[in-house]
Amino acid sequence: VQLQASGGGLVEAGGSLRLSCRTSGKYSSFSSRSWYRQAPGKQRELVATIISNGSTNYADFVKGRFTISRNIAKKAVYLQMNSLKPEDTAVYYCNAKISTAEWWGQGTQVTVSS
């Protein structure tokens, strides 16, 4: 399984970005798909998850601003990020899990200027 994240960039505070994560490989469905992020000098943290039945969960620090979605036919997961803040600056990683197995994308940089 390979995950390819894209859509990062430089945006001003209050702006929006949409991240995409496309999947290739033998699996077409996963028990969960998630976005994580890692800021310089900090640990990687969970941002949002969408599970197989379509239910979603968000970290408190993005609730109301970020939306995770998926396109099963395209084997893609998205993260719509609105009202971005400088503290959202990080490398964003997509993740896919089946039971105890998981895969990571290469990360896409999001930089929010104040």
Image: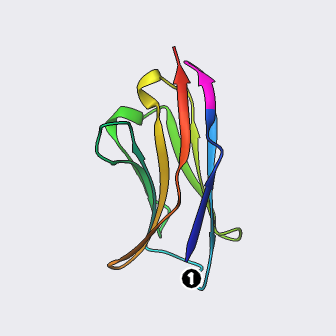
Tell me if I can see residue 16 in this picture: no
Q: Position of residue 69 (x, y in %)?
A: 57, 53
In the picture of the structure, the residue carrying the numbered disc 1 is 27
Which residue in the rendered view is the most extreme toward the front? 41
Please name the residue shown 53% across and 43% down the image: 67
2 relative to 17, above or below = below
109 relative to 77, above or below = above
Q: Position of residue 26 (x, y in %)?
A: 60, 86
First to last magenta residue range:
10-15
Please name the residue shown 42% across and 45% down the image: 37
Near-viewer residue (30 or 9): 9
Name which residue type carries label 1: Tyr
Q: Position of residue 56 (x, y in %)?
A: 44, 54
Q: Position of residue 112 (x, y in %)?
A: 53, 25
Q: Is residue 45 left or right of residue 6?
A: left
Tell me if I can see residue 50 in this picture: yes
Colour logic: rainbow
